[in-house]
Amino acid sequence: MKNTLFLLLIASLGLLAQGGKPGAVDRSLPEFSFDRLELAGQLYFLSSDYLQGRRTGSVGNEIAAEFIAAQLKAYGYEPINAADSSYFQRVPLRMVNAPTRAALDINGSSYTNGDDLLVIRGPEAEATAQVVYANFGWVDPAADHDDYANLDVKGKIVITRAGLPGDQSQQAVFRGMEEKAAMAAAAGAVGIFELFTLPFPWESFKRYLGGERITMTEEGSEATIPYGFIRLPAERVNELQSATGGLRGSLASTGMRTTGLGSRNVGGILRGSNPALADEYLLMTAHFDHVGVGRQGGGAYTAEDSIFNGARDNAFGTVSLLAAARAFAQEPPERSIIVLAVTGEEMGLLGSKYYADNPLVPLEQTIFNFNTDGAGYNDTSAISLIGMGRTGIDEQIETAAAAFGSSVIANPAPEQGLFDRSDNVNFAVKGVPALTFSPGMTGFDDAIARYYHQVTDNPETVDVDYLKRYCQIYTLAVRLIANRPSAPFWKEGDKYESAGKALYGNRK
């Protein structure tokens, strides 16, 4: 309480500097004059029923993309895509529908799709074959790791552990979904299934991946053998691990369909005010997609309300992105700014991954990624910083929060692994210092669950005064980071430090 009162006193006396150190705060900056009604209007539009939950690839998602692009153009931002002089980056996606019938038999026990089996990639197939265990089913020559090196899987069905060696995070699981089938096929396998040992309910996992699903697998790179997940009892896993030649089995999968699907990232560029720093870019991101309508949303709905509007998740964050963009157009920071609204976050962080793999501004010139994701809040006196203590920008965040009478919650709900569950992680793995800025959250409680991915996440339930303050803090924080004398970098020993050194050289 004493610390909070002290910060409020400093803020009220105007003793916080634009660079994050004691001094006179410049309250003529545009962020000190945000209009709550303008912000509310953007929130109400982006989370209106008209946009039908902004599901990736939907008409509502495209309307949101066009709206964001129009704002950036009006603010005077340069198009992010120099190749076609547009504000868009096309993200190549595929719509995948579950097979109409699939089953895997292991030693006389049958596992059917939708029960204890989930086939999510691959062609129609039918085979009678031995079933063998292949650890993670992973091949990485750079790390001298090959789970197939001393294992004959030719003509066999492979069972593996989920994720990657030493990494069972959500990101690793998604990477396995994209790459493991090709590795197993190259070794001669006819099918591959990962053991479901993930830290969330099987029923939720099936709903998420078992129906209509969006992936970034491009045409021509589809899985050539069936791939999915299986839930097995411990005794059957032990049996597989100890069976030298494998267990007898069979596999059948029919009726899976894949079609192309278009979606776009949206972005613009603003040149920095300091010529000596203007070739360095601070990347601001927010995802503008949500989960759609009805069964697409994965949660409870009724005939009266079947639209998952996503006001908090993430119209809230998208509005803060646009608010900052407008403020910087009026008063540019010293470094250049990239504003990037990404698609496909709800489908597996797809839009940010595509940009990180195909950047429109070189990543070695991108000094920081500050992501804003508003999944929910239960403390309007604070903001949350997911990744605090990792990149050396804590002082700027605390300064910005105090300037508007708020405090900072550091790394809430650590058991949820939130750093690796939002778009920032796709830039972190490339070496770019990256964090996620979120509304005040002390943990995943009923106040969060009441709206998170629910049809109740409607704009009229959002505290607009808090939205305004959140936008102000986010904007000032970005400005302070962009105006730092030195670029941020990973704290020594951070798991992404080596990637940062590879990207930037020996910058510290």
Image (cartoon, grey):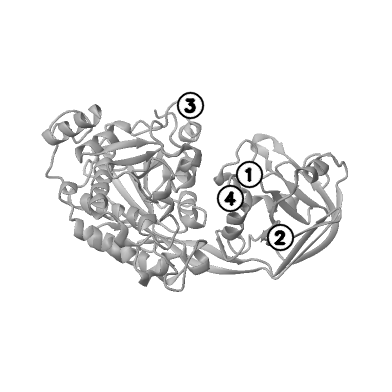
Q: Quadrant of the N terminus?
A: top left
Q: Residues within 10 Å of mark 4 (few under 14, many from 20)?
A: some
Q: Looking at the rendered structure, which numbered label has been put on residue 224?
A: 2
The residue indicated by pointer 3 is 493
Asked whether the residues under the numbered discs 2 and 3 touch, taking CB atoms below 8 Å apart as contact, a structural biologist would say no
Question: Mark 2 against mark 4, which lies toward the viewer?
Answer: 4
- At 55% across and 46% down in the image, what residue appears? 171
Relative image position of residue 61 (x, y in whole percent): 41, 66
Q: CA distance from mark 2 to mark 1?
A: 20 Å
Residue 399 picture location, percent across and down? 24, 34
Q: Is residue 397 above or below residue 249?
A: above
Residue linked to disc 4 = 174
Query: Residue at (56%, 58%) from the top-left corner?
Result: 208
In space, the residues marked 4 and 3 are separated at their CA atoms by 25 Å
Residue 368 shown left or right of residue 329 in the figure? right
Identify residue for label 1: 163
Q: Quick one: label 4 or label 3, which is nearer the N terminus?
A: 4
In primary-sequence order, the first of circles 1 and 4 is 1
- Along the line of sight, the residue nearer the viewer: 323 or 41: 41
